[in-house]
Image (tube, rainbow, N blue to C red):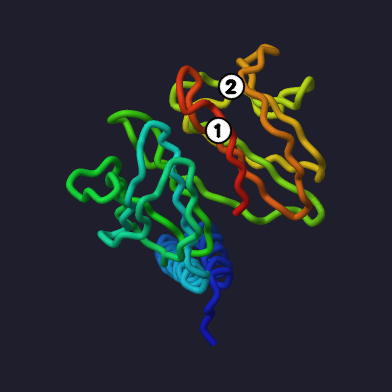
Amino acid sequence: MSPTKPDDYFNKAGKYHLLADYYKYNNPTLHLHYYNKYVNYLQRAIVDEQNNRASAQTNLPPAQVRVMHAAPETDKVDVYVNSTRVLQDFPYKSVSNYLSLPQGKYQVDVYPAGNQVSTIASRKIEVKNGKMYTIAAIGTGKNIKLQAYEDQSAVPFGEATLRVIHLSPDAPSVDIGVKNGDVAFPELSYRKATNYLGVTPMNLELEVRKPGTKDVIFSLPSIQLQPNTAYTIYLVGLVEKEPSLEALMLTP
């Protein structure tokens, strides 16, 4: 029976590669014969592996995508996905439910509420089956952008995970530290997201500080972290004017 698994093809390719090397100098005809077999099986292995990956990806559930309005000086908006309106009169600091989207590329357009003439922000977003995403409208004035972040719900049993995303357009890079304690996330800059940090479920108090100092820019409300839950803290708003800097905490 001919092999059907990539590993079988790779094993055969490896065998013929050894034979090709063995005859490389003392029998050029056999060297070429076995080398062609090596190339053939290697190509079949690569194609089969790619097909298996594509099949596995197809069997995953659709992507889950939600939208956040984090542009502090922008009024209510309407959000369109591939020219279909999915959110209407969507106000600042709002977060939608997750929308199921099959794997692919989607055109996301944001318009002023009730005015589909000129977009505030527009971007093509690619999503993959089995993954979760938050798409945030961020920035001020005419500099509004759509920023995509991949969400992760998997958490070690009995633990919690936490990350922070900096979406305050006029805030400098910041340190995120435990109140009166160590820095947990150093030098987080605008539009960047930290990695998820595994933490023991607890009551947690965090501070936003000027990098490398104890100077507190903003103190977050106390957070009660529950087990088996992934948390993301979004820093939104403005440092120099209204609406002021604050923290939104979401779970996927």
In the image, what residue type sits under mark 2? Val
- Which residue corresponds to mark 2? 174
Quarter-of-image position of residue 248: top right
- Circle 2 Cα neighbour tier, 10 Å, few/some/many (<14 / 14–19 / ≥20): many
Pick the residue in front: 204 or 27: 204
Q: Position of residue 34 (x, y in %)?
A: 46, 67
Q: Is residue 82 left or right of residue 158?
A: left
Q: Looking at the picture, does residue 95 appear above or below residue 169? A: below
Secondary structure beneath label 1? strand
Q: Which of marks 1 and 2 is nearer the N terminus?
A: 2
At x 54% / y 66%, what residue is drawn? Answer: 10
Q: Looking at the picture, does residue 206 appear above or below residue 60? A: above
For the view shown, which residue lies furthest in the left direction?
117
Pick the residue in front: 172 or 155: 172
- Circle 1 Cα neighbour tier, 10 Å, few/some/many (<14 / 14–19 / ≥20): many
Mark 1 vs mark 2: give the one in front.
1
Whether residue 37 is visible, yes or no, is no
- Which residue corresponds to mark 1? 235
Q: In this view, does 126 lie to the left or right of 93?
A: left
Check whether the beta carbons of the residues at disc 1 and disc 2 lie within 8 A of each other. yes
In the image, what residue type sits under mark 1? Leu
Q: Which mark is residue 115?
A: none
Secondary structure beneath label 2? strand
